[in-house]
Image (cartoon, helix red, strand yellow):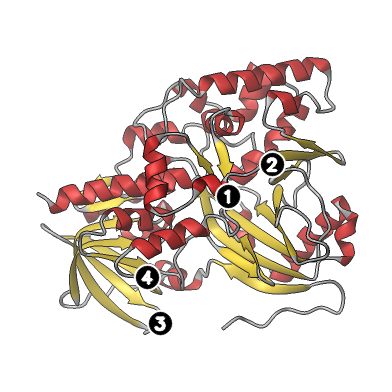
Amino acid sequence: MEKPKITSSRGPVIGPWRGEVPEPCHDQFLRAPEAKIAWPEGPREKVEVAVVGAGLAGLTAAYHLRDRQVVVLEAETQAGGVCLSGSYQGVPYPAGSAYFYYPWNDEWRKWYRDLELDTDAALVADPSSALYFRGEFFPDCFSERGLKKLPLSPQVMDELRRFAHDLAAWEAEWEPLGSEGLIHPELDRFSFQHYLEKIRGLPPEATSLFAPYCASCLGAGPETVSAWAALYFLMSEFSPANRTAAFPEGNARLIQALLKALPAEPRVQQVAAGVRQEKDAVQLLVFDAGQKRTYCLEAGAVILAVGKFAAQKLLSAEAGWSPEDFRFFRYSSYVVAALCGPLSLEAPGYENWVAEERAFTDFILAPRLVRDGGPRVMVAFAPQPFPQGREALLHLSARKKGREILDTAIRLFPGLKNEVEEIRLYRFGHAQIVPYPGFLTRLKQTFKHQHGRIILSSSDSEGLPCIEAAIIQGQKAARLARELLER
């Protein structure tokens, strides 16, 4: 049942927080230090594989193991992780992860085709991106052609064009996602801001143009994220081969396709509260938040398809990891705001980046084209300040955050003032990994992704916060689990 809306005598209706519900996990993980975990005498059920987490990585792993006996456990009331969707008066919109890059190779084509996803129909019409900068839209901002139109000095424009040219050329040289090492590891030693300003000689004004992109896609600003990570992401934007693809409801479409292909639905409101590794099996202590009871599940292999912030709460030293192993993982927090109403706003890009603003970094319109006063949604993406954003978000009211985003949107686009009728807010406390300088190097060189029969699998295991990373990690976990079962 939907919670009652927060009404106001002035302005649009602002609904309560949606998205993640942190309480069930916090109740289990944030116990007093002296609290002991009470394990039942024996397992209630035995399966071949248990997957903890029904986000994209977990469901991908289960999909590739669907010929085995697999149980998927999910702490939330629904599967999907950050791949959520919403609907306003019949108009679908992404309430989280919105789009993906469709690479032109047979392996990815087959993966999507096997899920019965029409990626050709999902290709976004050009321009896929536009930059809103000082009161004006600049379409096709991630291309040499688009950069030429920015109101910057000729010297800065020349260097930005060289930068764009280099990005397009490097794509053929850099290793794909899923690689074990880093090409040009020296670029992981310093920030993207350092790279732009100290190595390429660009002024801070140019760095600020990439700030919304870094915050939204990588969890923090150019001064914080690794140059390697930012360059790797921007290669996809400037690539002449890759194309942006998006379904009306965002990447929730991928979740639904995976769920449809599984022989059994995930078990929701099942919080993994403990893990212990036996000689030939792994036991999970599971709290059923719906039934308010605890039980033990035993599996031949366990895939923890959750962020390392959760994995470290589950894994004792006996499982093969220590708390120190997880301390270098850092996460951003995120808010997605759906501004609903008969919106007349026009924007040239599918995704529209907003420079020099704090309330939100980018937005998309659903549908993209105006329908004569029909219902429409402006989906604004609002990464919270790193690293202090998560703690503030836990105590921030939906009403206050909604007003902040709305006021900024109206200041930028005054026509929205009398058109927004409802605001829906989605929050994600640990939205994505932040690849700060040195993180990727340490992840590739020293971190253990498997110990015994426990496999860690999440986009943060790839070190980059994108759906392709989650899919690849799910595929890797499935292969490792299959090897364990076939021993």
**Within the image, what quadrant is residue 56 found in?**
bottom left
- The disc placed on residue 100 is none
Gap in Å between the C-alphas at discs 4 and 2?
Answer: 34 Å
Q: Which residue is mark 2?
A: 212
Which of the two labelled residues, at mark 3 and mark 2, occupies the earlier sequence position?
Answer: 2
Q: Which residue is mark 3?
A: 290
Q: Which residue is mark 4?
A: 271
Gap in Å between the C-alphas at discs 3 and 2?
Answer: 39 Å
List x then y, in percent, for residue 67.
22, 59
List x then y, in percent, for residue 411.
88, 53
Nearest to viewer (mark 4 / mark 2)? 2
- The disc placed on residue 246 is 1
Which of the two labelled residues, at mark 1 and mark 4, occupies the earlier sequence position?
Answer: 1
Q: Amino acid at mark 4?
A: Val
Gap in Å between the C-alphas at discs 3 and 4?
Answer: 10 Å
Query: Badge 1: how crowded within 10 Å, few (<14), some, or many (20+)?
Result: many
